[in-house]
Image (tube, rainbow, N blue to C red):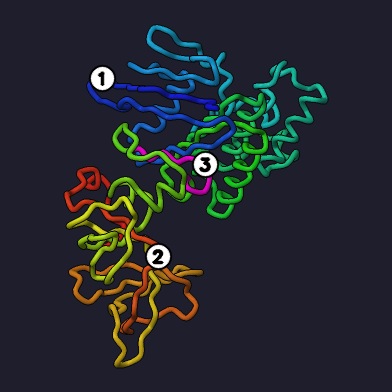
């Protein structure tokens, strides 16, 4: 059963199109991440769902209730939708506890025990603790303010939670732990949520469903595994992570390229193609003198737990990148043999116009 259904939503500002016939189906109790570059329209989509913007066309339904369609719109305060903005939007004259209690029945009179208990519960949920309840927003860091904003949005247990990059102000380590804690909390509550982010790793780790957006349209909607391992086009492939892209030819489910004979997905086109693998799919083994190799290590980028190897392939015009653990990694100048784990993705050799809008992340 769908909890949130967006059908054919379009939006323009002046002569600029921002959303182009967007359709999205979010299952009850699931988390969806809308990921895209700045200016692609993802925040505008959230604002339309919340009721802060009116679409030019299309409709939005929460459960069995249509909240907006042509000629009709339920105001934001009656949609029972939680919303966490990028800047938190806390009330500066209220304490943290009062900000959180603001959305509860009774508002600022929430001094009753059940309100105090709920505030403490929410502060613990966002990893702050009850000691923060009497502080003012200006006494908090940016990351702490965002967590208070999230707690406030959770206070009334909304039907749908909208999150507009709420983790972007957090430090790297805290971002990951808070993101996981929030995801676990939302799932435990059976709450339907939509996260907007430009962070690909965040989208893939947070959500049950990922919608990749470019220029007001979705290029692909699917599970994190689907959009990452089987991207629909080159734009989606390159946007979601590092790629190894090689020219090749497909026949009978096998691609011939600079890596040798590589199995491809069953839906691969035949003939001239661009073969795509992820760097972690390639295994580089150092070969002894006289043994046949696939290429030569030209650079090693140390990243702590892993390294990114730049390898010049025999017979390839450009080097490729291979990710592997840092322990025992090859060094510059060594000859290696490359093996491919799993299957590659093959795209028809015609150019993908969307790719021009995103810088290449791999050779």
Q: Is mark 1 on a helix, strand or loop?
A: loop
Residue displayed at 69% across by 25% down? 101
Q: In which quarter of the image is residue 132?
A: top right
How many tags in the picture? 3
Please say whether residue 16 is visible from this viewpoint: yes
Q: Mark on residue 208?
A: 3
Q: Quadrant of the C terminus?
A: bottom left
- Taking the magenta stretch, the answer to whether it contains residue 190 is no
Please say whether residue 84 is visible from this viewpoint: no
Question: From what the image shows, is residue 238 above or below residue 22?
Answer: below
Q: Mark on residue 14?
A: 1
Q: Is mark 2 on a helix, strand or loop?
A: helix
Closer to the N terminus: mark 2 or mark 3? 3
Q: Which of labels 1 and 3 is toward the front?
A: 3
Residue 329 percent coordinates (x, y): 43, 78
From the viewer's perspective, is 122 left or right of 145?
Answer: right
Residue displayed at 32% across by 92% down? 289
Q: Disc 1 to disc 3, how far (Cα)?
A: 35 Å
Q: Mark on residue 281?
A: 2
Closer to the N terminus: mark 1 or mark 3? 1
Residue displayed at 81% across by 22% down? 112
């Amino acid at each position: 059963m769908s909890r949130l259904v967006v059908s054919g939503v379009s939006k323009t500002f002046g002569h600029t199109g921002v959303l182009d016939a967007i359709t999205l189906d979010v299952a009850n109790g699931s988390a969806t991440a809308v990921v895209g570059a700045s200016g692609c329209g993802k925040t505008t989509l959230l604002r339309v769902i919340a009721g802060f913007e009116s679409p030019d066309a299309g409709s939005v339904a929460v459960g069995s209730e249509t909240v907006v369609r042509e000629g009709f719109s339920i105001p934001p305060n009656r949609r029972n939708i939680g919303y966490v903005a990028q800047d938190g939007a806390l009330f500066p004259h209220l304490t943290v506890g009062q900000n959180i209690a603001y959305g509860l029945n009774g508002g600022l009179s929430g001094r009753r025990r059940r309100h105090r208990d709920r505030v403490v519960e929410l502060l613990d949920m966002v990893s702050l603790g009850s000691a923060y309840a009497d502080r003012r927003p200006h006494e908090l860091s940016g990351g702490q303010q965002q967590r208070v904003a999230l707690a406030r949005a959770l206070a009334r247990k909304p039907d749908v939670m909208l999150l507009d990059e709420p983790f972007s102000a957090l430090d790297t380590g805290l971002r990951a732990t808070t993101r996981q804690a929030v995801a676990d909390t939302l799932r435990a509550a059976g709450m339907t949520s939509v996260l907007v982010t430009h962070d690909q790793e965040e989208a893939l780790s947070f959500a049950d469903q990922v919608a990749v957006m470019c220029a007001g349209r979705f290029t692909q909607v699917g599970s994190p595994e689907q959009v990452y391992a089987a991207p629909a086009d080159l734009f989606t492939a390159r946007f979601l992570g590092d790629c190894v892209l090689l020219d090749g030819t497909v026949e009978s489910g096998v691609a011939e390229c600079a890596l040798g004979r590589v199995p491809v997905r069953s839906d691969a086109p035949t003939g001239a193609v661009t073969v795509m693998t992820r760097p972690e799919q390639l295994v580089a083994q150092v070969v002894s003198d006289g043994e046949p190799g696939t290429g030569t290590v030209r650079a090693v980028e140390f990243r702590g737990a892993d390294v990114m190897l730049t390898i010049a392939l025999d017979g390839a015009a450009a080097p490729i990148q291979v990710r592997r653990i840092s322990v025992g990694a090859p060094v510059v100048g060594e000859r290696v043999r490359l093996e491919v784990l799993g299957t590659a993705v093959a795209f028809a050799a015609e150019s993908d116009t969307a790719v021009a809008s995103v810088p290449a992340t791999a050779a």
